[in-house]
Image: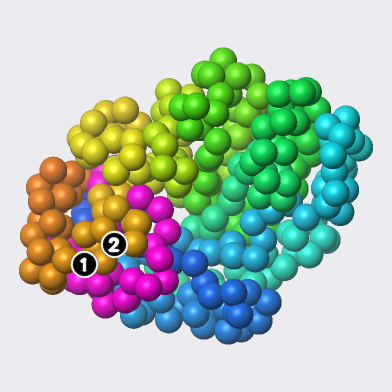
């Protein structure tokens, strides 16, 4: 392919599994906490990251809205109280403000790139509010109560997806699936307790957009039981090369779609310490393995804010030359 694509064309082709003029690149960081409630500064920060790093598209941040903020969860101790939960609704700040803030970011990006927004699975929304120990105690004591809570949260996550796509103007969602660590649940438990609400939100998003990404999150320093997600489908999968599957070809084979990854995201690893020449060689090696079709260069997960944007630009510029 000789003709030069725009960034949008390149990424949409990659999402569709088509050959691209060069391999797209996208890596991301969290937005500093002082910007979370100042929506204009937040939007400026996200737009500045796009321009300073030279990435081909943006994974937009949900910083400040990670947990599902029902007041009923603030001091919950009895698992049966989960049966009293009700959806927050589209007018609640949890949904409304995420849509409003994201709309500002989308306007700042001015149509220059594909933009996808982070949405967590319902069980993670619960866990981010009550913590892992309580989540695990609850699900062991009464899995049906936790499944009910996840169905309630899924209603709000679907409202969020609808607002992000239809009102804010994002192209798709970046759906972070978690809780799949090999020691956390058996496959049967995950499929019974977690998968129904995971899939409810994902299937809803896929009915609205064919530009969604599933992020197989591996941040607990333990590999995931990837088989529990084999029936989860989207345009692309963002996976952990350094905790789950090292080989790009194997990732393509297992996930059956475009795959996105390549670099370790953890502080102190290669991306943070290597010279520009070393990074350029690593990019060439990744592209040799991944090819120009069905592959996007990224990192296992979010990058630490100590990483200079210049280093991400080195990756993007190297990919643009191959």
How dense is the environment of label 1, judged by Cα within 10 Å: few (below 14), some, or many (20 and up)? few
Please provide the residue range marked out in magenta.
Answer: 294-322
Q: Does the magenta stretch include residue 198?
A: no
How dense is the environment of label 2, judged by Cα within 10 Å: few (below 14), some, or many (20 and up)? few
- In primary-sequence order, the first of circles 1 and 2 is 2
Visible in this render: residue 15? no
User: Could you say where residue 103 lies in the image, as x and y percent from the top left?
Assistant: 61, 71
User: Could you say where residue 210 lies in the image, as x and y percent from the top left?
Assistant: 47, 45
Q: Residue at x 33, y 40 (%)?
A: 243
Q: Which residue is drawn at 39% across and 62% down?
A: 303
Q: With respect to residue 277, does 220 lie above or below? A: above
Is residue 294 rendered to the left or right of residue 290? right
For disc 1, the marked residue is 273
1 and 2 marks in contact (CB < 8 Å) = yes
Is residue 242 rendered to the left or right of residue 134? left
For disc 2, the marked residue is 268
User: Could you say where residue 156 lies in the image, as x and y percent from the top left?
Assistant: 75, 48
């Amino acid at each position: 392919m000789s003709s030069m694509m725009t960034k949008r064309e390149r990424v949409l082709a990659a999402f569709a599994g088509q050959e691209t003029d060069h391999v797209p690149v996208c890596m991301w960081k969290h937005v500093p906490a002082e910007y979370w409630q100042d929506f204009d500064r937040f939007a400026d920060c996200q737009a500045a990251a796009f321009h300073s790093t030279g990435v081909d598209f943006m994974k937009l941040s949900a910083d400040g809205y990670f947990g599902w903020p029902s007041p009923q969860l603030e001091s919950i101790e009895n698992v049966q109280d989960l049966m009293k939960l009700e959806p927050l609704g589209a007018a609640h700040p949890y949904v409304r403000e995420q849509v409003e803030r994201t709309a500002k970011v989308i306007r700042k990006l001015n149509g220059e790139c594909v933009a996808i927004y982070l949405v967590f699975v319902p069980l993670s929304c619960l866990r981010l509010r009550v913590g892992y120990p309580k989540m695990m105690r609850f699900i062991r004591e009464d899995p049906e109560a936790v499944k009910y809570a996840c169905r309630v949260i899924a209603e709000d996550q679907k409202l969020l997806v609808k607002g992000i796509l239809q009102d804010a103007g994002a192209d798709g969602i970046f759906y972070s699936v978690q809780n799949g660590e090999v020691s956390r649940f058996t496959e049967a438990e995950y499929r019974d307790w977690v998968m129904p609400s995971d899939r409810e939100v994902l299937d809803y998003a896929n009915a609205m957009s064919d530009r969604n990404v599933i992020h197989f999150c591996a941040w607990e320093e333990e590999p995931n039981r990837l088989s529990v997600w084999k029936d989860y489908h989207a345009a692309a999968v963002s996976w952990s090369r350094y905790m789950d599957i090292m080989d790009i070809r194997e990732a393509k084979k297992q996930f059956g779609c475009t795959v996105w990854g390549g670099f370790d995201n953890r502080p102190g690893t290669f991306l943070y310490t290597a010279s520009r020449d070393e990074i350029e060689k690593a990019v060439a090696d990744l592209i040799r393995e991944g090819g120009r079709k069905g592959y996007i260069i990224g990192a296992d997960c979010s990058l630490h804010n100590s990483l200079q944007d210049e280093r991400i630009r080195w990756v993007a510029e190297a990919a643009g030359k191959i």
